[in-house]
Image (spheres, helix red, strand yellow):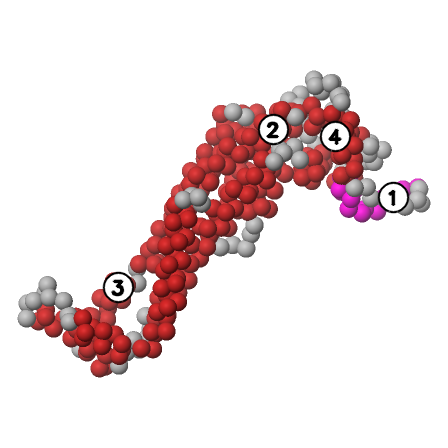
């Protein structure tokens, strides 16, 4: 009986750590890569864009936190994480690089810049390209991580299969009988092994085909992760994409300043706060005052398009003043 118990324990210890260990190792690798990529991205602001390095720390940290949660299976979207990041980055680029003379932006104006970033599109195609390139790699690694977790659950379930005494004795005999005679290098007869396996594990034999497909899928995902969807290259590429996005905004600085100015110039008669900014975005707000005339919400897109046309014929030195309230 002691031999039987020892055999069951050894078999469990040999089999159980495989997938869980791989699962834990994969998550540790994720965290290591994310920390390195975050530091790599933060160094861009520390070395190249020092004027906004302190303010950029928190948006970068939030971005990589969202990416980490996504890889671990959280119900979040990579697109939204990058949208929030670039929304937070726009006020910094606008006030530190495009208009370095601006010493301080009010909270209301900063919030308006965040809310209008997607319409003004200061970062051009780069703010979308980084999401497209990274999402594929993150998705492959996320699915691989979830697959390992699912495999671990299946193994845990099969470990609790109850064996009869006859099966337990047959398993011990198959594995240890030669050992009793000191023949530790002799393997059990193949035919005997197959008979024992078929007889004792018939109840779980239906898992064979799905399990083989599962292993094949893991191999496919592993190859994808090492090839076109390499996570390390994708994460390290975030720094490059952010730099390109900032450079694009700087190169189009005069036109961008004019666009922002003209958009807000149309609403100087409205007290400048978050409510008036929401009016710019086409969200209905109730304005109280002596006038009883209804105020129609205005969509920002026509204003942006009109201001872009005006800005396109302006001098390249961006002579039009930017009015900051």
- In x, y percent, where is residue 258? 74, 26
Disc 1 is placed on an element classified as: loop
At a point 34% along the width and 59% down the height, the residue shown is 19
- In x, y percent, where is residue 72? 46, 53
Please state which of residues 39 and 212 is positioned toward the viewer in this rendering.
212
Q: Earlier in the sequence, mark 1 or mark 3?
A: 3
* Front label number (3 vs 2): 2
Q: Earlier in the sequence, mark 4 or mark 1?
A: 1
Q: Earlier in the sequence, mark 4 or mark 2?
A: 2
Disc 4 is placed on an element classified as: helix
* Front label number (4 vs 1): 4
At a point 17% along the width and 73% down the height, the residue shown is 174
Quadrant for the N terminus, please. Answer: bottom left
Q: Residues within 10 Å of mark 4 (few under 14, many from 20)?
A: many
Between the C-alphas of marks 4 and 1, the distance is 25 Å
Residue on which the image places disc 3: 13
Using residue 267 as the reference point, say whether residue 293 is left or right of it: right
| Contact between labelled residues 2 and 1, with CB atoms less than 8 Å apart | no
Residue 166 in view here: yes
Please state which of residues 42 and 54 is positioned toward the viewer in this rendering.
42
Residue on which the image places disc 2: 248
Please state which of residues 33 and 244 is positioned toward the viewer in this rendering.
244
Residue 156 in view here: no
Residue on which the image places disc 4: 308
Between the C-alphas of marks 1 and 2, the distance is 37 Å
Between the C-alphas of marks 1 and 3, the distance is 73 Å
| Contact between labelled residues 2 and 3, with CB atoms less than 8 Å apart | no
At a point 41% along the width and 53% down the height, the residue shown is 221
Q: Earlier in the sequence, mark 1 or mark 2?
A: 2
């Amino acid at each position: 009986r002691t031999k039987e118990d020892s055999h069951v324990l050894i078999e469990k210890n040999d089999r159980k750590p495989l997938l869980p260990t791989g699962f834990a190792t994969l998550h540790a690798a994720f965290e290591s890569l994310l920390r390195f990529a975050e530091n790599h991205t933060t160094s861009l602001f520390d070395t190249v864009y020092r004027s906004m390095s302190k303010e950029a720390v928190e948006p970068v940290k939030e971005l990589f936190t969202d990416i980490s949660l996504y890889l671990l299976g959280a119900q979040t979207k990579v697109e939204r994480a990058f949208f929030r990041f670039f929304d937070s980055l726009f006020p910094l680029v606008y006030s530190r690089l495009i208009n370095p003379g601006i010493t301080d932006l009010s909270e209301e104006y900063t919030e308006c810049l965040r809310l209008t970033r997607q319409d003004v599109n200061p970062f051009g195609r780069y703010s979308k390209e980084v999401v497209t390139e990274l999402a594929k790699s993150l998705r492959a690694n996320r699915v691989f991580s979830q697959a390992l977790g699912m495999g671990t659950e299946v193994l845990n379930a099969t470990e609790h299969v109850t064996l009869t005494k006859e099966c337990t004795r047959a398993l011990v005999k198959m594995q240890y009988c030669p050992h009793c005679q000191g023949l530790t290098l002799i393997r059990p007869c193949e035919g005997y092994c197959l008979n024992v396996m078929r007889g004792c594990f018939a109840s779980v034999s239906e898992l064979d085909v799905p399990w083989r497909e599962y292993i094949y899928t893991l191999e496919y995902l592993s190859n994808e992760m090492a090839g076109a969807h390499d996570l390390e290259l994708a994460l390290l590429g975030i720094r490059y994409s952010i730099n390109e996005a900032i450079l694009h905004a700087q190169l189009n600085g005069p036109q961008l300043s004019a666009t922002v100015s003209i958009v807000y110039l149309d609403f100087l008669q409205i007290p400048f706060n978050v409510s008036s900014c929401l009016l710019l975005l086409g969200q209905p707000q109730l304005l109280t005052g002596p006038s009883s005339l209804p105020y129609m919400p205005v969509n920002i897109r026509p204003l942006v398009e009109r201001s872009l046309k005006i800005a396109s014929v302006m001098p390249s030195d961006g002579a039009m003043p930017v009015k900051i309230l």
